[in-house]
Amino acid sequence: MNAPHVVVVMGVSGTGKSTVGQALAAELGVPYAEADGFHPPANIAKMSGGTPLDDADRAPWLDAIGAWARGRTGLGGVVSCSALKRTYRDRLRAAAPGLCFLHLTGERSLIAERLDGRRDHFMPGALLDSQFAALEPLQADECGTAVPVTADPASVTAQAVAALARCPAPTPVTHP
């Protein structure tokens, strides 16, 4: 990329947001933040119990991610965040204008298979349908790109780097 972007790696649970996000951050030489770390304990308990979050649950989580992204504006960074709905992405962009989104995509059957193989994550596969139902893909006026996750993580990351290089340069920001 021409300038250091703040990239939000988005998609439903099981697409590899954390894996690709960490690899992308390493490739770009910028910090990585795991969005799950921004959830308050009540959100994790709710999801662990098989209950999807509602918009009120997500608001403080999105605000915390937005604050992190704002602090990285002009410096670059990568954060994973489902960002399933346009309104969520708009909220993140309001906090940190110039965000670029990397939407990891995959067929429901592939993602379900991946979730079935996970053992150490609080997000149960039973919530996958609710995530696909909520998903609103990136729109033409949103900075970002979609990359399928059918290949191995290194290939997906390489595709992401190439696609993100075509994103418009972010507005320069000076930090104290």
Image: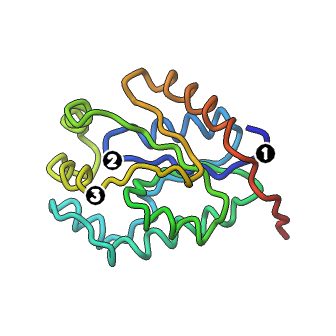
Q: Looking at this view, is 30 or 41 the one in front? A: 30
Label 1, label 3: how far apart the Cα atoms are: 32 Å
Q: Quadrant of residue 157?
A: top right
C-beta proximity under 8 Å, tags 3 and 2: no
How many residues crowd mark 2 within 10 Å: few (<14), some (14–19), many (20+)?
Answer: many
Q: Which residue position holds label 3?
A: 134
- In the rendered image, the vertical position of residue 91 relative to residue 24, given as above or below: below
Image quadrant holding the N terminus, namely top right
Of labels 3 and 2, earlier in sequence is: 2
Foreground label between 1 and 3 = 3
Label 2, label 1: how far apart the Cα atoms are: 28 Å
Which of the numbered marks, if any, corresponds to residue 3? Answer: 1
Left-right relation of 55 to 143: left
Of labels 1 and 3, earlier in sequence is: 1
The amino acid pointed to by label 2 is Val
Counting from the top left corner in percent of width and height, residue 59 is at 41, 75
Q: Residue furthest front?
A: 140
Identified at 31% across, 40% down, the residue is: 14
Counting from the top left corner in percent of width and height, residue 35 is at 46, 57
Q: Looking at this view, is 142 or 93 the one in front? A: 142
The amino acid pointed to by label 3 is Ala
> For numbered disc 1, what is the local secondary structure?
loop
The amino acid pointed to by label 1 is Ala
> For numbered disc 3, what is the local secondary structure?
helix
